[in-house]
Image (cartoon, rainbow, N blue to C red):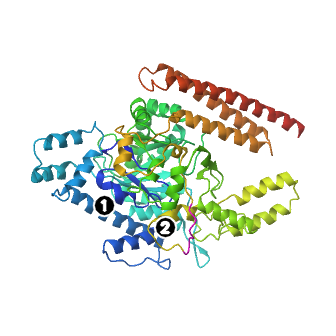
Amino acid sequence: MTNVHSFHIPVMGIGFTIDTPLKVSQFGIDSVVSLVDDILIEKLRKMYCDKFERPYTEITEKMDDFRAKRITSYLDLIYDESVKKFEELKNVTAESATDLKKYFSMLPETSSLKKEFKNLTKDSFNFEEIKAWAKDNLIMGSIDVNIMTKVDKENYRKKIKLSSEYNDAHAALRGYANSVLNSSLVLSAGMNPRLYSYMEQFEDFYPDENGIIKKKIVLKVSDYRSALIQGKFLAKKGLWVSEYRIESGLNCGGHAFATDGFLMGPILNQFKEEKENLTQSVYEILTSALDQKNRVVPNSILPLKISAQGGVGTIEEHNFILNHYKVDAIGWGTPFLLVPEATTVDKSTIEKLVVAKEDDLYLSNISPLGIPFHSLKGNTKDLEKAKLIEKGRPGSPCPKKFVAMNKDFLDTGICTASRQYQHLKIKELEKQELAVEDYEYQYNKIIEKSCTCVGLGTSALLAYGLDTKTEGKGVSVCPGPNMAYFSKTMELSEMIDHIYGRTNVITREDRPHMFIKELHIYLDYLATRIGETRFSPSDKQRKYLLNFASNLNDGIDYYQTLFNSLKKEFSGSKQQILELLDEGRKTLKCLVKEIESLENNLAIQ
């Protein structure tokens, strides 16, 4: 579990980090590949086989278990080629010395590895000596994968439903489990008990007597309670969670899983205070389960990492999260969309991201999953959608069907962004004879859904000049709010220099602290929820909103105590942060009054 960097590159969209490990793992950087789109994966496998002059046999949809086989073959290819690059880097010659120097130049100044290299080369650059040392000491970045647990569509063959092991997430899990990778599986979007139970079938997820796990489990969570529940559930099956990856509920990219008003700082603090209890309680369950299964029980308690991501943008924030909350690593996602050496984004989309400001980045309801989704105004997939609406034909053709899981009209499932679903839903709406205002509200809720499962992968095809006949050319993009403060394309080394404070790529001076930014997003989210509730208020919704507001208020209390107690950290911005917290509390008080006024609406009803 040794890392040479204190940051990792999280999964972004479907295609933006699809081949990131091939670009950065040789420099010791961990990154995460999405396993949603096996069609995109197969296209890239063909492209890379051609590029690296490797034999390629297409895995078609007519083949048994094609989804899992595509994923396994792609991951094995990415691993093989990444290892080749890493071995070339270690096999130091006059020609390859540049990449080796780049490896060390990007490491943080606190790196013991960097210090050793400097000592080794301070007097001379002996290739054989360095080669021997590099072979024993250099570490390659981990090639991790992500599965959204709820994107687990059932599948059919000749109109006969296949068993659950052929569901999308199950097949993706099997594809990863059968690969040669020694890395981590990042599970996001909450608990899927059936998928978690399926993991028991694969040997690579279990620890050996030394506590070594070939394929480690990472849970992406937004609160402590969820981590504890899921950790214990998996432990009862003999499976250890090696890392809890805490993500801001709303100050992140992609899908946003809003907490009930719990803010990131208090959540991180709870993990810090409870880490030992979490580790011990889950480990006791694990050893009991392994013993019952007659499996090897590790000789000692297994290592547990805590990492955090969502909105970090400066060296000061990076170091504070690492040191104050005792986390092991920080995820830097959104800014890497502007680093072509690390991510795969088409030129047109990069140009839009470069000029994006706060008002261009918004929390939308466009995702067919029904989960709030960060988006960029003017993205070409939404422009495509708008043209279809103007023509009176809202909805997408739905060529890939990865989220065709709604069963309102078809037992086999249908996507809420599809033309078929929206046509049927609008017809259903028309029969309700609603007032004009209510009709328009419900109509807009139907047609706002966008075909993100295609749009989030198309960028990679455009970037590489691959065929988009099936997908079209519309691109969905899902940057976090942090994108507003990064306004140019960057080289990999420049981005990493920014992370470690060797340079500063943020030219704006009005960027708020990450905790303040998250608070404002939560206040906006609460205001939106209050507005939606006015259409059909209920006592249950009112109580939910009041509890949400109470948790936000507790979060503001926590931050005021925290920043007042700091002696050195954020000395230049502490006063402004405290003033913004006061403003946030005033806004919250106004929102609470609005929530309380809902009681009058209920009384009228």
Q: Amino acid at mark 2?
A: Leu
Q: Between marks 2 and 1, how big is the CA–CA gap? A: 23 Å
Image height of 567 relative to 46, above or below: above
Q: Say which element carries label 1.
A: helix
Q: Give the mark toward the camera: 2 or 1.
A: 2
- The picture places residue 80, in percent across and down from the top left corner, at 30, 64
Span shown in magenta: 469-475
Q: Nearer the viewer, residue 5 or 269?
A: 5
Magenta-colored stretch includes residue 245: no
How many callouts does the rendering have?
Answer: 2
Q: Earlier in the sequence, mark 2 or mark 1?
A: 1
Image height of 587 relative to 105, above or below: above
Residue 261, picture quadrant: top right
Query: Is residue 507 something one can see in this rendering?
Result: yes
- The picture places residue 113, in percent across and down from the top left corner, at 23, 42
Residue beneath label 1, please?
82
Residue beneath label 2, please?
462
Horizontal side of 80 relative to 338 (left or right) equals left
Q: Nearer the viewer, residue 349 or 598?
A: 349
- The picture places residue 397, in percent across and down from the top left corner, at 64, 71
Query: Is residue 304 something one can see in this rendering?
Result: no
Magenta-colored stretch includes residue 472: yes
Q: Given contact means CB atoms under 8 Å apart, are the residues at marks 2 and 1 in contact?
A: no
* Residue at 55% over, 24% down: 578
Q: Nearer the viewer, residue 272 or 301?
A: 272
- The picture places residue 465, in percent across and down from the top left corner, at 46, 70
Residue 526, picture quadrant: top right
Q: Say which element carries label 2.
A: helix
* Residue at 44% over, 64% down: 174
* Residue at 86% over, 59% down: 432
